[in-house]
Image: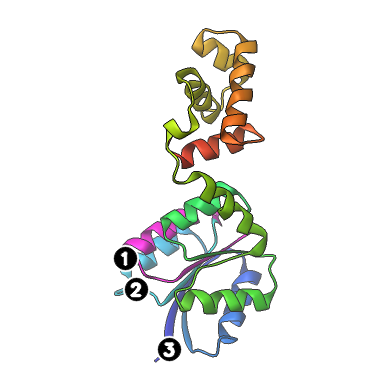
């Protein structure tokens, strides 16, 4: 009996690449292809039972692939879900794993790597593009830490929240009623305590640790 696979991908050329990769696994597949989030959500809700495999893109024309992964995970938390994306964002990678993805590879990876990744998740093994592996090591350094571990002051935490809200230094200073030079001082301390090199990285680590 053929195995069932859900492909959520809006690029026609890459759809056919995935179908070709599935054939190279040596298994028979019944393939359901969705071009966007709306189609995928409908298929997940209407399909009786769970798919044997899901291949999901993150950037969809009408939504986020993370939401597709969450919906799939709710129907079957053990479902092999493999992300194939152009996105290298550390936060997207973390969000996908937390939503239930069992693997995350880049579309630029060669066809053999894609086939191998499919075979790995089918064996319930985790897989990730080598170029993204460093993100997981960085995450491992912070995921078990709590706000107290970073020893952030109340004002430093407020500044971090302001960064997450997209405020400029001046807007942050105005919100907190302090000088912009003090804001800069707090941000330098934040970077040092969180081992971050940018505001976006500090925000990502703050969220991962539950600070904001």
Q: Which residue is mark 2?
A: 50
Whether 86 is drawn above or below 196: the answer is below
Q: Earlier in the sequence, mark 3 or mark 2?
A: 3
Query: Residue sitting at 56 percent across and 54 percent down?
Result: 136
| Real-space CA distance between mark 3 and mark 2, rounded to the nearest whole angstrom | 14 Å
Query: Residue sitting at 68 percent across and 68 percent down?
Result: 109
Whether 184 is drawn above or below 140: the answer is above
Q: Earlier in the sequence, mark 2 or mark 1?
A: 2
Would residue 199 be found to the left or right of residue 108 on screen?
A: left
Q: Are marks 1 and 3 in contact (CB under 8 Å)?
A: no
Whether 29 is drawn above or below 162: the answer is below
Q: Are marks 2 and 1 in contact (CB under 8 Å)?
A: yes
Residue closer to the observer: 194 or 54: 194
Question: In this figure, which colouring scheme has been used for the structure?
Answer: rainbow
- Residue 132 position by quadrant: bottom right
Q: Which residue is mark 1?
A: 75
In the image, farthest residue toward the left: 48
Q: The N terminus lies in which quarter of the figure?
A: bottom left
Residue closer to the observer: 125 or 176: 125
Q: Which residue is mark 3?
A: 2
| Real-space CA distance between mark 1 and mark 3, rounded to the nearest whole angstrom | 20 Å
Taking the magenta stretch, the answer to whether it contains residue 79 is yes
What SS does tag 2 mark? Answer: loop
Would residue 108 be found to the left or right of residue 65 on screen?
A: right
Category of crowding for the residue at label 3, using alpha-carbon neighbours closer than 10 angstroms: few (below 14), some (14–19), many (at least 20): few
How far across and down, in percent of the image, does residue 54 sit? 46, 70
How far across and down, in percent of the image, does residue 23 sit? 57, 86
- As drawn, the label of residue 36 is none
What SS does tag 1 mark? Answer: helix
- Residue extent of the magenta highlight: 59-86
| Real-space CA distance between mark 2 and mark 1, rounded to the nearest whole angstrom | 7 Å
């Amino acid at each position: 009996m053929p195995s069932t696979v859900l492909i959520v991908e809006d690029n026609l050329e890459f759809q056919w690449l995935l179908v070709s990769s599935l054939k190279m696994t040596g298994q028979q597949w019944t393939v359901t292809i969705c071009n966007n989030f709306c189609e995928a959500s409908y298929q997940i809700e209407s399909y009786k039972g769970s798919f044997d495999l899901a291949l999901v893109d993150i950037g969809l024309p009408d939504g986020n692939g993370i939401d597709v992964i969450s919906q799939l995970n709710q129907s079957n938390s053990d479902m092999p879900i493999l992300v194939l994306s152009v996105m290298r964002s550390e936060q997207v990678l973390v969000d996908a794993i937390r939503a239930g993805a069992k693997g995350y590879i880049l579309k630029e990876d060669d066809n053999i790597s894609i086939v191998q990744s499919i075979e790995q998740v089918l064996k319930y093994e985790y897989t990730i593009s080598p170029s993204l592996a460093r993100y997981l090591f960085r995450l491992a350094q912070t995921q078990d830490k709590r706000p107290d571990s970073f020893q952030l002051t109340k004002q430093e935490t407020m500044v971090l929240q302001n960064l997450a809200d997209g405020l400029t230094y001046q807007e942050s200073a105005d919100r907190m009623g302090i000088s912009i030079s003090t804001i800069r001082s707090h941000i330098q301390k934040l970077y040092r305590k969180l081992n971050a090199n940018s505001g976006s990285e500090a925000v990502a680590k703050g969220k991962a640790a539950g600070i904001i």
